[in-house]
């Protein structure tokens, strides 16, 4: 009986692990897609910063071209002013010079604004230089780690499935059937529950003192009166409770 109970406990541990591995394997596609999304978002946030820099540089170059054009017009207006034949021509040249001065000054202010943006964005890019340089290789490593951990899970799953079959076939048929029924009936896949602090650790129902005593002193298979799971007491329960 004692070995049957320890086989049941082992079976439960194996099944709990198998359940976790199955979940990992079944959700792999979704989890991989989530990682991919995260990476895309990260990469796109960096592209956004780089685009901001390119846009500021382009705007600045455009403004500088406009300044050169305005200065050329200014020189022409200066010549017109000197060669003005009458008051009307003189005033027209003066007006144009005024207007071009205002334009040039406005463009120059705008160039300074763009320079500030360029400085700021360059600062951000400098701060994140390593992260940006390693973006691709970091992603490849993340993906490789993911695939390797998935491959390990698959191998472990196959290995433990075989171990499960071995333990199950070593149990009396009746007990194996009880176990299987309990496992498939419970949502958490727990058929064998440890007694912790006098309560069933699966349904948290406090057990009658007599049951706990029987569990400690006999090798009988005893089930929880509330959830019908097979109960066991861990002999190092006290140490484990203190350790955790
Ligand atoms: Zn219970």
Image (cartoon, rainbow, N blue to C red):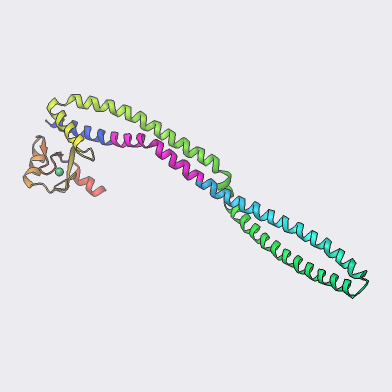
Relative side of 6 to 145, left or right: left
- Is 1 displayed left or right of 73 in the figure? left
Viewer-side residue, 4 vs 176: 176
Instruction: List x then y, in percent, for residue 48.
Output: 57, 51
Q: Quadrant of the N terminus?
A: top left
> Is residue 97 or residue 90 the one in the foreground?
90
Whether residue 172 is visible: no
Report which quarter residue 195 is drawn in.
top left
Instruction: Please check the rendered image and state whether residue 183 is part of the magenta-colored stretch, yes or no.
Output: no
Query: Residue at left 54%, top 39%?
Result: 137
Taking the view exactly as shown, the residue that stands out farthest to the bottom is 87
Location of residue 62 with respect to 78 vertically, above or below = above
Kindly tell me whether residue 73 is visible in this rendering: yes
Seen at 58% across and 48% down, the residue is: 47
Q: Main secondary structure of the magenta part?
A: helix
Ligand 1 is found in the corner quadrant, namely top left
Residue displayed at 9% across by 42% down: 225
Q: Nearer the viewer, residue 27 or 148?
A: 27
Please tell me whether residue 98 is drawn above or below residue 173 in the rendered image: below
* Residue 94 location, quadrant: bottom right
Magenta-highlighted residues: 17-40
Is residue 21 covered in magenta? yes
Instruction: Please state the total of marks drawn on the protein image.
Output: 0
Which x, y percent locates residue 88?
Answer: 88, 73
Residue 47 appears left or right of 2: right
Relative image position of residue 16 (x, y in whole percent)? 26, 36
**Residue 34, how many percent across, how many down?**
43, 42
């Amino acid at each position: 009986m004692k070995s049957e109970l320890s086989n049941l406990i082992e079976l439960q541990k194996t099944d709990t692990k198998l359940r976790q591995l199955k979940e990992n394997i079944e959700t792999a596609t979704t989890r991989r897609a989530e990682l991919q999304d995260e990476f895309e978002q990260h990469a796109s946030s960096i592209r956004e910063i780089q685009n901001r820099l390119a846009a500021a540089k382009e705007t600045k170059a455009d403004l500088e071209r406009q300044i050169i054009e305005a200065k050329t017009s200014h020189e022409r207006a200066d010549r017109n002013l000197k060669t003005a034949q009458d008051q009307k021509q003189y005033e027209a040249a003066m007006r144009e010079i005024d207007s071009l001065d205002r334009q040039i000054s406005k463009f120059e202010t705008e160039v300074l604004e763009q320079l500030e943006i360029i400085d700021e964005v360059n600062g951000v890019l400098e701060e994140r230089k390593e992260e940006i340089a390693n973006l691709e290789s970091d992603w490849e490593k993340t993906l490789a780690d993911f695939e390797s951990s998935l491959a390990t899970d698959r191998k472990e799953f196959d290995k433990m499935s075989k171990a499960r079959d071995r333990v199950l076939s070593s149990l009396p048929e009746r007990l194996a059937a009880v176990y299987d029924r309990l496992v498939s009936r419970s949502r958490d896949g727990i058929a064998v529950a440890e007694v912790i602090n006098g309560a069933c650790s699966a349904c948290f129902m406090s057990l009658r003192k007599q049951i706990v005593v029987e569990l400690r002193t006999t090798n009988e298979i005893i089930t929880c009166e509330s959830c019908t799971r097979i109960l066991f007491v861990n002999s190092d329960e006290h140490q484990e409770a203190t350790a955790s």
